[in-house]
Amino acid sequence: MKKLFLILTGAIMALGASAQTAEEEYAPTIKVSPDASPEVLKEKAAHVVPSRNQLQALKDGYIAFIHFGPNTFSRREWGTGKEDPKMFDLKKLDTDQWVKAMKDAGMTKVIFTAKHHDGFVLWQSRYTDHGIMSTGFRGGKGDVLADLAASCKKYGMKLGVYLSPADLYQIENPEGLYGNLSRKTTRTIPRQVEGRPFANKTTFTFDSIDDYNEYFLNQLFELLTEYGPIDEVWFDGAHPKRKGGQTYNKAAWMELIHKLAPNAVVFGYEDIRWCGNESGGTRETEWNVLGYPEDPVTGNRKPDMMAKEPGSLESLKGASFLHYQPAETNTSIREGWFYRDDDTQRTRSANDVFDIYERAVGGNSIFLLNIPPNREGSFSQTDVDVLAEAGKRIRETYGTNLLAGSSLSGDLADGDINTFIEADGPVEIVMPKAVTINRLMIQEPIAKRGERIEGLRLEAFVDGSWKEVATCTNVGFKRIMRFADVTTDRLRLTVTGSRATPYLAEISAHFYAARPPQLEAVRTVDGMVTLSPARDNFSWKSHGLNAASNLSAGMKIYYTTDGSRPTTQSKLYTSPFRLDHGTVNAMAVAHGENGPVMNARFGYVKKDWTLTADSETEGHTLRMAADANPRTYWKSSERKKSALIVDMGENKRVNGFIYTPQTENADGMISEMQVMVSNNGGKWRIVGNYEFGNLVNDPSPREQKFDKGVDARYVQFVPIRTADDSPCVTIAEIDIF
């Protein structure tokens, strides 16, 4: 490639300035030889482009999911298909509140679970009575989907539907259609029902259709013709139970969708794919060009969607087809897909939602966030508040392009990804004055030139020289580069790797005003304390990423260990420090704003402790009760309420203890214990009995001070009762102070 240095002054290269490749060479699916060389694969992959609907799905970017049904009332994640419809005891419904909250969050589309795996339908279907028509909601005349469709129209929100192919009601019902071994015959869709004519007079005739596929197609017809424009049809691959060798007539489903909802993308088949997890995890490199062993439209074999990098050049080897298929990062705002309660079911923080947004939407994928309505037919206020705050951050951060007025103009600043420049050399951007930024957004012209860029380097001109501030791998539809605050009047962006001649369509710079986070203090078993932004206490399918840390670049932490309140004049935290015992108070400061003060009490260092008990179980050894890791725990044998003895190695002044219960389950949580101390391990004296309530619902650390301090070397913890009356005991962590 020829070297090209561009100082963008408004006279940017026009769309046609670079060598053109015939438009007909670009397509959503391109056939390749399984033994194609890496060079050929690279070239072919660079010519795979999204369809019109796929491109729109990427533009929609941030969308909502709604799981609602009998599970909302049973508090289960998956139903059985045997539920009495009257279990769905809905009294009121506020879909306007749903859609307004989603709009405030910055979402563009909502996908509604019209039927989950239990087979219960939330619209007035002609083809079953297992659904809302058999409940007391509005006298059996209610239609949740109709209400939602009206709210979407009112607020300008796109609508999609999730119709589960699996159907436990049709499996478990003796007259059910799923796997009933019916003959495959010619059938007309929709099947007419007396008294319920369709306004849409389109009909379909399919050969070789069995009873269940006819039922499914009839319901698809209802959903796609009676609830306004449908922009996404969502299928998953879950099969909680199979029967009778039932298969799905995918080709017939697709024909119906393409005819009745021409603007809809289909999740789970050739249009949109699963990201490989339900946790909010994203890949550092997310190519949307995948290698298929068979035709992705007609074949059944798919690539591994859970692979580390399914679109890598290595993963394309041996493919017969290269196919464009964006990933959808789907997860829930709550722990679980369905609402349970507001007390024990945790909700993601705004930090976490905003972080996933930047990683997903800014990582060449689509962000699908589930918000489950409660039993009052509305979103819980906690969820609404999180959505509002996350939406505020998105607007504040990305509503302003800080490169406005710079040399960046023309094709790179016109808001059109179909206009672009060749980026065969560094792109330098000159601003009229210095600005502070910590985000750079880049887009490729994927609809015209596919996904090509394999690596990018961003530099800023600071103190008279160029300094690297960030790098990334691929770009695709959109890449958000995140980095520490940098103040500069010149930026330089260089493509460091590409599958073919690289092109850039859009560049913008932004600033995220970091909020000082709540901090947490963690101490190792040998006494080293680390201060960092607190991780979200969100355990459901945790993605393992520290959102607060990702969003806190540029913050400073100040701390004290003498009990005083920290200020900006206190010790500046730079690295872990040793604390034998005592209290740490710490505060984060960002952009002149003080965060909340964290208080953490630490007992004596446990490194040299000796622990004694008369039993332990495999995988839950005695040492785990004092390893400074609350995620591990000691468990006695199944039939022993074993006492735990701690030998601290020397006499110390003991003022109390902290008992941390395990959170994996309710087994062996100690609800009442007796504490004894000794100087020699032979003669013991009782300090007191202590009770801990509500452990199952609130398994938080329990701190207990003694009435007065004692001198002791040995401390014994004797269980009296357990929360679940189990015959064993468990301890995640014991601290003595």
Image (cartoon, rainbow, N blue to C red):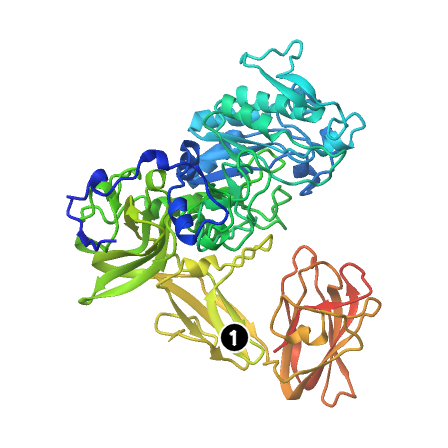
Q: With respect to residue 318, does 551 lie above or below?
A: below
At label 1, which amino acid type do we have? Thr
Side (left or right) of 423 relative to 378: left
Q: With respect to residue 23, does 347 lie above or below?
A: below
Residue 733 visible in the picture? yes
Residue 380 drawn at (x, y percent):
55, 41
Side (left or right) of 250 relative to 488: right
Q: With respect to residue 544, does 112 lie above or below?
A: above
In this view, which residue lies farthest toward the right? 639
Residue 436 visible in the picture? no
Residue 378 drawn at (x, y percent):
56, 35
Residue 709, picture quadrant: bottom right
Residues 237 and 331: in front is 237
Disc 1 secondary structure class: strand
Residue 85 drawn at (x, y percent):
72, 29
Residues 243 and 57: in front is 243
